[in-house]
């Protein structure tokens, strides 16, 4: 695994860029982007073979952000990979910018599937994994779902298909921060218990009590590679708005942009601009 210190330093930069992007756009989804930083970074920097020379190849590891509204974490991570320019992050959600509120595979190098309608990204990831099996492609497919997204029936149809086709080349993460736009997921439409549901659907299940622990996320990814005949899901317990005290565990930061003053305070908490 990449040195832990470097992963932590990069996570801070990613969080800063998430806050800057959403503030400049005056629109976006900071809470669920901040909760997913360590998961997305670990996948892109310790698991996937993605780099500038193969970004347009169809035969390589792939990642699908099924919770497409969390695009800021994906864009900020792709900037760290050198696949998009960091200065372009501030064009987020501008008319004509490739960095729209939901990621487009036609516009952004490194985006492997256009997502936004909840549940569809997960289904697409299952389709990619099936294709890899059919063609003898050894590469893996990674996907990230939101916990509120798992209220969608399509998620469970895809989960059933993945188990039926024994997609051991598929690794899914559930960003279990417990909150969605209308409040606690259990109050809106309780999708828990995630672990028992996925087990019942035929998945190998890993539960992470700290979904911000790089080493635990890495070990989960490595464990998934040893599982044969089943897809693997990691239920990662995270903190919505992670890293910014006034955003943490607050449902109202699901889809609200910080003011300039709030942005300044957030960046100070993260160590300055």
Image (cartoon, rainbow, N blue to C red):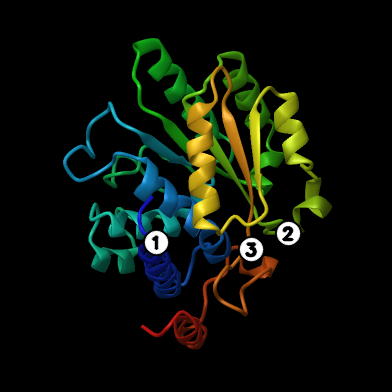
Sequence-wise, the earlier of marks 3 and 1 is 1
Vertical arrangement, residue 126 with respect to residue 37, above or below: above
How far apart are labels 3 and 1 at the CA level? Answer: 18 Å
Label 2, secondary structure: give it: loop
For label 3, the SS is loop
Q: Nearer the viewer, mark 2 or mark 1?
A: 1
Foreground label between 3 and 2: 3
Number of callouts: 3
State the image quarter where residue 162 is shown: top right
Would residue 248 be found to the left or right of residue 270 on screen?
A: right
Proximity of marks 3 and 2: CB atoms separated by less than 8 Å: no
Where residue 148 sits: x, y (%)? 68, 48
Which comes sooner in the sequence, label 3 or label 2? Answer: 2
Return the disc, 2 or 1, that comes first in the chain's sequence. Answer: 1
The percent position of residue 138, horizontal first and vertical second, equals 35, 22
Q: Secondary structure at mark 1?
A: helix
Label 2 neighbourhood size at 10 Å, few (<14), some (14-19), many (20+)? Answer: few
Report the disc number at residue 104. none
Q: Is residue 42 visible?
A: yes
Q: Are marks 2 and 1 in contact (CB under 8 Å)?
A: no
> Residue drawn at (64%, 29%), measured in percent from left and top?
204
Quarter of the image holding residue 255? bottom right
Question: Residue 145: x and y, percent?
Answer: 57, 43
* Image point (62%, 79%), residue name: 246
Question: Which residue is the site of mark 3?
Answer: 239
Q: Going by the picture, which residue comes out furthest to the left?
A: 53
Q: Is residue 100 above or below residue 171?
A: below
Q: Which residue is mark 2?
A: 182
Q: Which residue is tagged 1?
A: 7
């Amino acid at each position: 695994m990449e040195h832990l210190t470097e992963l932590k330093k990069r996570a801070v930069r990613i969080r800063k860029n998430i806050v800057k992007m959403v503030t400049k756009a005056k629109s976006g989804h900071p809470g669920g982007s901040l909760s997913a930083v360590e998961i997305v970074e670990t996948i892109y920097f310790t698991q996937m073979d993605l780099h500038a020379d193969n970004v347009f190849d169809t035969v390589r590891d792939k990642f699908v952000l099924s919770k497409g509204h969390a695009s800021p974490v994906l864009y900020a991570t792709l900037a760290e990979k050198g696949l998009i320019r960091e200065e372009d992050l501030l064009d987020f959600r501008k008319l004509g910018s490739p960095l729209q509120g939901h990621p487009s595979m036609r516009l952004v190098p490194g985006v492997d599937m256009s997502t936004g309608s909840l549940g569809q990204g997960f289904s697409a990831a299952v389709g990619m994994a099936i294709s890899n099996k059919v063609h003898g492609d050894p590469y893996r497919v990674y996907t990230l779902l939101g916990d509120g997204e798992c209220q969608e029936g399509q998620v469970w149809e895809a989960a059933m298909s993945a188990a039926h086709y024994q997609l051991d080349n598929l690794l899914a993460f559930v960003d279990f921060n417990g909150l969605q736009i209308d409040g606690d997921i259990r109050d809106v439409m309780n999708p828990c218990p995630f672990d028992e549901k996925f087990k019942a659907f035929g998945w190998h299940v890993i539960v992470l009590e700290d979904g911000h622990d790089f080493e635990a996320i890495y070990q989960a990814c490595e464990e998934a590679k040893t599982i044969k005949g089943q897809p693997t899901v990691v239920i990662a317990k995270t903190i919505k708005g992670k890293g910014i005290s006034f955003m943490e565990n607050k449902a109202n930061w699901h889809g609200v942009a910080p003011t300039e003053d709030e942005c300044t305070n957030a960046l100070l908490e993260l160590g300055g601009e």
